[in-house]
Image: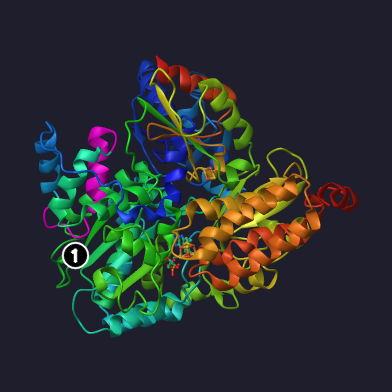
Amino acid sequence: MPKRDRWDASNGAGAPAPAAHWDEAPRVRALIAAYDGVPGALLPILHALQEDFGFIDARAVPLVAEGLNLSRAEVVGVIGFYADFREEPPGRHILKVCRAESCQAMGSEPLTGHVLDRLGVEMGGTTPDGAITVETVYCLGNCALSPAVMLDGRLHGRVSSATIDRLIAEARS
Amino acid sequence: MTRVFVPGDAAALSVGAEEVAEALAREAPARGVSIEIIRNGSRGMFWLEPLVEVETAAGRIAYGPVAPADVPALLDGGLLEGKPGALCHGLTEAIPYLANQERLTFARCGVTDPFSLDDYRAHGGYRGLARALALTPAAIVEEVAASGLRGRGGAGFPTGIKWRTVLEQPAGQKYIVANADEGDSGTFADRMLMEGDPFLLIEGMTIAGIAVGATKGYIYIRSEYPHAFRAFSRAIHIAREAGLLGERVSGSAHAFDIEARLGAGAYICGEETSLLESLEGKRGLVRYRPPLPAIQGLFGQPTVVNNLLSFAAVPTILAEGAAFYANYGMGRSRGTMPLQLAGNMRRGGLVEKAFGITMRDAIEGFGGGTASGRPLRAVQVGGPLGAYLPESLLDTPIDYEALAAVGGMLGHGGIVVFDDTVDMARQARFAMEFCAAESCGKCTPCRIGSTRGVEVIDQVLARADVPANLALLDDLCEVLADASLCALGGLTPNPVRSALRHFPEDFDRAPAVTIAATSG
Ligand SMILES: Cc1cc2nc3c(=O)[nH]c(=O)nc-3n(C[C@H](O)[C@H](O)[C@H](O)COP(=O)(O)O)c2cc1C
Ligand code: SF4
Ligand code: FES
């Protein structure tokens, strides 16, 4: 999870310049306006943006900063701090594989190996056909039914390599 | 019409509960019977999920684990009459796993429809709030203090003392914050309650608000729990519509409302000051203290931050009285603890028991030993920062002080079992790796030390200069423990050192002679 190492992203390096013409700007502004008067609205806004666009487009950063009266560096710093926020579009489906202790005790490491083999990607990568992005997660709260994975927000428990094959096939179909 | 219960809990859904409910909805009418399907929470007997229950004159009869394909045969075999047969476990309440528990906080979870206020009230809900409304704020706080309730989020701090501090702050904007970040591996109690008995939490937070004079509450739910977030948001909406949240709570003069917020995939945001930063829309950097959150918390205002289970214990304490609650437990650990049995466990699930049950009773009695059937080798209690304990310590009672005496900690009550195939050096490595991945970066020992820790253990795993590297590892642990700002860095040595202490053979990777020869 490289993002988690980016604790120093707050130096603001790489904060994008304002986009002069961006077709989506009105949509982003409307979305930000919905949080008018909500204290500490940055995370909810970033979640809403990601929900809508699939990732946080760099062109949205100045709009968010402006809307919340923050510096662009602050917004970039927050995006960089949290593992959830993506700066690139992910695959059409997102498969999160739990690799925390309870799932380790039930074979999550061989299972992870199987997932990566099947998809032919490294952890964090997206299949060449753009179908699936695979990520590590530390605990999905399904530890009594370990090992667990989550596909597009839906939890799966007692996961075997056969389950993985089925989920991948469904995601690709 | 026969009432049938199929959990809508995320874990039950993760093994096919939705498909089972669909099969029942399809197959029962096809046989000319009409049924009402209620989507309850989970009873916490996850090895039986999907668990289908049928209401009969004698009580609810349990069937599980039910696969969608089992449904036609179960119906033909008399499931709707509660007839015995394959997958039938008889009366749910008589299943030893449940019957032997002391369920106070989880008394309703899995029993009721989580979104029915009528159901909630019919099962004792909102009696705690009614009593609180008849008391002064100070009397509510004293009731909580007298119950002996200690925070269920990990540190075990007395809840009454925290509330008293906030109550004593000058009137003004104060906040209630429920910590539902539940990042510890092996834990799922918060999730179960949000999905299975959300009004309990709403009631507990409301009582807290009235007790300390706070009108606004937040619940910070980790983003790995989208289902719980939706369920809880729905419950807030229902409570608001019913006048149980809002300007006049239950028609009283008290205002209280709750807003649910999503985390964003950072374990450190479970630490209370990091959580407050996150709620304020910032990076989750841990704050220096003082000031305590109780004095200057969210947006600089006095704030009660409690684990969700701490709030959830409060309605019972108010409804039944402090003495009732304090009667459970041992020593300075009063009341009940929702334990979560996980990992390589035959019967994983939620076990709420009075403090004092031994780990062995929990793991062997309730859990039935390992899922693999192989010998148990190590147990990690209290999440990723908890110690790894060997089989020989299983007779330790589950109690804050007794666990501390053997180098362990209860944390949020997660118990993760490993069988004899575990490699404890790898587990120690993971502890360091996890700390490195989740460090907020504010202090050097944690940020740099954990990364160094991974490298050093890698050297050990590669059989390079083992004694020297183990000495280095010990130094690193020393620095982490002594110089970290918060418990992420401060407690990461727990799993590492306990692995070394109890399982030294796993670190003894190569004869020292070979090392001297190759590294010299
Ligand atoms: C790294 C770290 C992670 C934590 N994660 C959680 C968590 O997920 N949930 C929680 O309630 N407390 C967590 N805590 C403990 C909180 O800081 C705090 O003590 C707790 O929320 C107070 O509530 P309580 O007194 O009811 O336990 C964590 C602490 C640390 C140091
Ligand atoms: S110990 Fe780690 S997580 Fe805690 S404040 Fe320091 S750097 Fe942040
Ligand atoms: S450790 Fe994998 S779901 Fe909790």
Direction from residue A162 to residue B12 in the image, left or right: left
Q: Mark 1 points at which residue?
A: B250
Disc 1 is placed on an element classified as: helix
Image: B204 above or below A119 = below
Tell me the chain of label 1. Answer: B
Farthest front residue? B520
Image-based side of A109 in relation to B303, left or right? right
Q: Closer to the camera, B397 or A22?
A: A22
- Provide residue B347's location: percent of width, then percent of height: 62, 43
The N terminus of chain B, quarter of image: top left
Is B210 one of the magenta-colored residues?
no
Q: Residue at x 15, y 38 (%)?
A: A19
Residue B76 appears in view? no
Image height of B55 relative to A70, above or below = above
- Residue A52 falls within the magenta-colored stretch: yes
Amino acid marked by disc 1: Ser
**Which residue is pictured at 31% across the width and 53% down the height?**
A77
Q: In which quarter of the image is ligand 1?
A: bottom left
